[in-house]
Image (cartoon, rainbow, N blue to C red):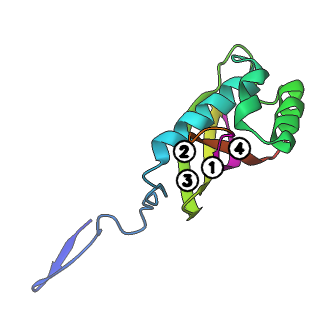
Amino acid sequence: MTTHTGNVRIGRIHGVGARRRPTPCTTPQNPLARAYAQRLLEVLTGLRPQEQLLAFATEDVYDRVRTLRALGCLRADGCRPLLQRVFDSAPRQDALEVTALIRVGARTETLAFRLECRALRRSQNVTWRFTALESRW
């Protein structure tokens, strides 16, 4: 309901009380972070063999992936997990910290991981590697 009092209009103000979603935190490397999140999700759900992470993960992360995969936390009744959103930040030029939101059936799960840029031995090629992995399971 709106009332007029002279030149002042009193009533509902659009947008007051409405919550705006914060702008997602991303860097120019977000497509890279998203690709690594997708690869990790596919390994954790069994769509890719775990061995595909050998060159892209430290030993600690590889062991953590093995444990999470065995637990089957990202499996739902006939539902394939879906990567929804990926947020990333760059604490250093050669590091990315990433949070991925994953839809599993009716619930949303999160994965957080760190990528660091490393040079491969005997070549000038550079690759990003998983150096940390966090989950709530």
Q: Position of residue 106 (x, y in %)?
A: 66, 30
Residue ranking furthest to the left: 7
Circles 2 and 3: CB distance less than 8 Å?
yes
Q: Position of residue 14 (x, y in %)?
A: 29, 64
Q: Amino acid at mark 4?
A: Phe
**Residue 108 position (above or below residue 29):** above
Indicate which label's residue lies in the foreground, 2 or 4. Answer: 4
Report how far apart the C-alphas of labels 1 and 2 lie in the structure.
6 Å
Indicate which label's residue lies in the foreground, 4 or 3. Answer: 4
Q: Which mark is residue 130?
A: 4
Q: Which residue is mark 2?
A: 86
Q: Amino acid at mark 1?
A: Thr
Q: Which mark is residue 88?
A: 3
Report how far apart the C-alphas of labels 2 and 3 lie in the structure.
7 Å
Residue 113 in the magenta stretch? The answer is yes
Tell me which residue sits at (81%, 30%) in the image.
73
Tell me which residue sits at (45%, 61%) in the image.
19
